Image (cartoon, rainbow, N blue to C red):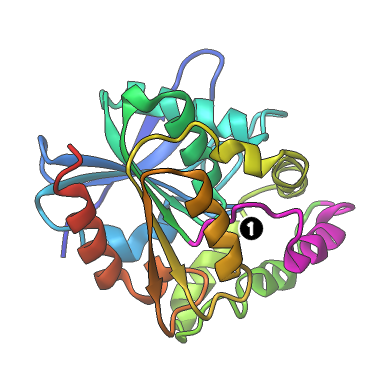
Amino acid sequence: MAAVAVHSAVLGEERPTLPYAETGRPGGTPLVLVHGYLDSWWTFEPLLRRMPPGLHAYAPTQRGHGDADKPPDGYLPEDFAEDLVAFMDSVGTERAVLVGGSSGGVQARIVAGRRPDRVAGLVLLGVPATLADKPKAAELWNAVRELRDPVNPELAAALVDGLTAIPMGRGFLQTVVDETLKAPARVWRETLRGLLETDLRATLSGILVPTLVVWGDQDPVLTLEDQQTILDAVPDSRLLVYEGVGHIAYWEAPERVLRDLTAFMADRT
């Protein structure tokens, strides 16, 4: 198992300080793992501890989430994207493969479209083309639009319940819930508001870097048609379908994700 260290990245006077996990040898092929809504770097723990030695992985916790700083504003997808570039600057990574999990793929693809000089490749793991037409997103917004602190742990547990087709350990899921509860109610609201009010289809334009799209055919949130929208918008993209896998492939099939990621990265850096 790979050794995983946790550090802090100071992004500058106008930006938050973010904790991040790091593993892999110095000089290894760099990749940056970008978590989704209400997660933290810990969501990638199944990947990080299995990371092959030839890769050098960073997994930052984004503003407002986990143990990161929680500024009063700045929770639009473009704000997270700008933080992502600042994070790469802070750790001295000029160019990396960006790996977005769930909604974290939105800010990853914004960076890929706007700063292709910083992105060697893009991997989207269960990432929505848009959320405007997703019933589960509307249901979640109804649950959080008036949310106040302290957030009910039952709501946090319901957020992750049913996302995977492969059963996960109770201890693992409890840690996921505990990480989710570190985000205050306003971050729940404003981050989701940003995802719903931003034209997410527009964030697919201008992406010219090689892109790998991974989708589990048991995903309860995203459809194959949704993933086809990404493929139609991104010229150099291809799809891998994981049979029997739900929304979070990096929990359910981490070894397969790493094999496919390693193969994708081989010619990208």
Secondary element under disc 1, as helix, strand or loop, is loop
Depth check: give the residue in front, 41 or 241.
241
The residue under the point 72% across, 40% down is 194
Q: Amino acid at mark 1?
A: Leu
Residue visible at 64% across and 49% down in the picture: 183
Q: Residue furthest top?
A: 13
Highlighted magenta segment, given as a residue range: 126-148
Q: Position of residue 258 (x, y in %)?
A: 24, 63
- Camera-side residue: 32 or 144? 32
Residue 185, horizontal then vertical, whole percent: 76, 49
Q: Nearer the viewer, residue 12 or 166?
A: 166
Residue 45 rendering spot, x and y as whole percentages: 35, 61
**Residue 178 lies in quadrant:** bottom right
Question: Is 77 included in the stretch rendered in magenta?
Answer: no
* Disc 1: which residue: 181
Relative placement, left or right, of 236 versus 194 is: left
At 65% from the left edge and 29% from the top edge, which residue is drawn? Answer: 71
Residue located 45% across and 82% down the image = 168
